[in-house]
Amino acid sequence: MKSTLISCLFFLTLCAGCTVPPYSRQDIEKLSGLPVGNGMTLHPTEKWMLISRPSEFTNEANGKPFYKIYFLELGEDGWGEPQTVSFESRFNDYHPVISPDGKWVYFNSDRPPPGEILPAEKMNIWRVAIRPNAFSTPEYLTDINTEHHESYPSVTGEDVLYFNSDRPGGKGSMDFYRASPIGNGFSAPELVAALNTADSENDLTIDALERFVVFNRYLFDTNEVDLFISNNQNGLWTDPVPLERANQADVWELTPTLPPGGTYLLIEVDGKIQVSLMDDVLE
């Protein structure tokens, strides 16, 4: 059963996406070793990407660096130097995710919610519209955010939003939820029960056609973080299975990312991008 799932997912991964991505094999492989922290995402049709990582600015309250989102453009000589984005704040902004249609950037932030001046005590999800040579003013997702943590968004080609939260009603710690687009907002989030456990589910990335997900799970008993994969079969998610060929002992595999085209899997290991071919991961 496991091999069948993996073979199916490999096929789906290769044919995911409706447009030909602008990146060559060399473009993707040059990302290997790039310093990141909690997020990387590539635009589906234009030659640029966003990453997040610790900045040089320190939070005086806890002595930790603020996380910022950076823009990198692909030129003839490779990827350019990271530049801060126009929607940056004086707070933590990280885990950018570009929607499959290239119209939105979703991200985590503890910047003050609308009408407030103090940073949020829990993480929230925001988004900005991608405009020609610019980003819009950040939008707080009122339909999604609560007084609890909402974070690590991922979005399908139909603008269905997946994210994790520690709100009441889950199976424990951080769990995955799903919300459908309604007008300019979203429906009430629903628990994706089949993907969740009493451990902490994080960093979900979803196929543009909502056919499979890759995510990591923090295992409280062993203090490990491993990658898992699940297939959507007629609207029902299969039991997640470990991505054994990607998981390493005593290593935390973070922020799995599916670049446009579906040939590669990007993950963060020890603060740097690790590039793998999907066929190597799923064999």
Image (cartoon, rainbow, N blue to C red):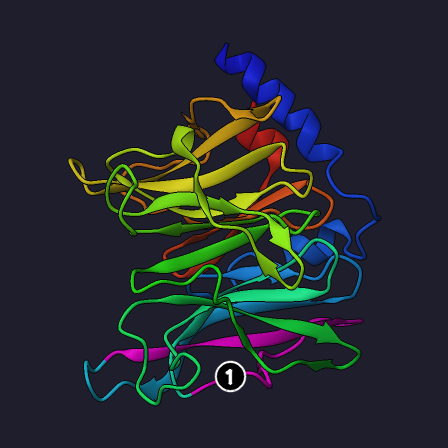
Element on which disc 1 rests: loop
Residue name at image x 66 percent, y 65 percent: 104
Is residue 263 found inside the magenta-colored segment of the image?
no
The magenta stretch spans which residues? Answer: 64-89
Q: Residue 34 versus residue 5: which sits nearer the camera?
A: 5
Position above or below: 14 against 88: above
Q: Position of residue 131 (x, y in %)?
A: 75, 76
Which residue appears farthest toward the left when viewing the image? 221
The type of residue carrying mark 1 is: Glu
- In this rendering, position of residue 29 left or right of residue 89: right
Q: Which residue is mark 1?
A: 88
Residue name at image x 57 percent, y 13 percent: 4
Residue name at image x 71 percent, y 58 percent: 27
Q: Position of residue 231 (x, y in %)?
A: 55, 26
Give the position of the C terminus as an image quadrant.
top right
Residue 35 visible? The answer is no
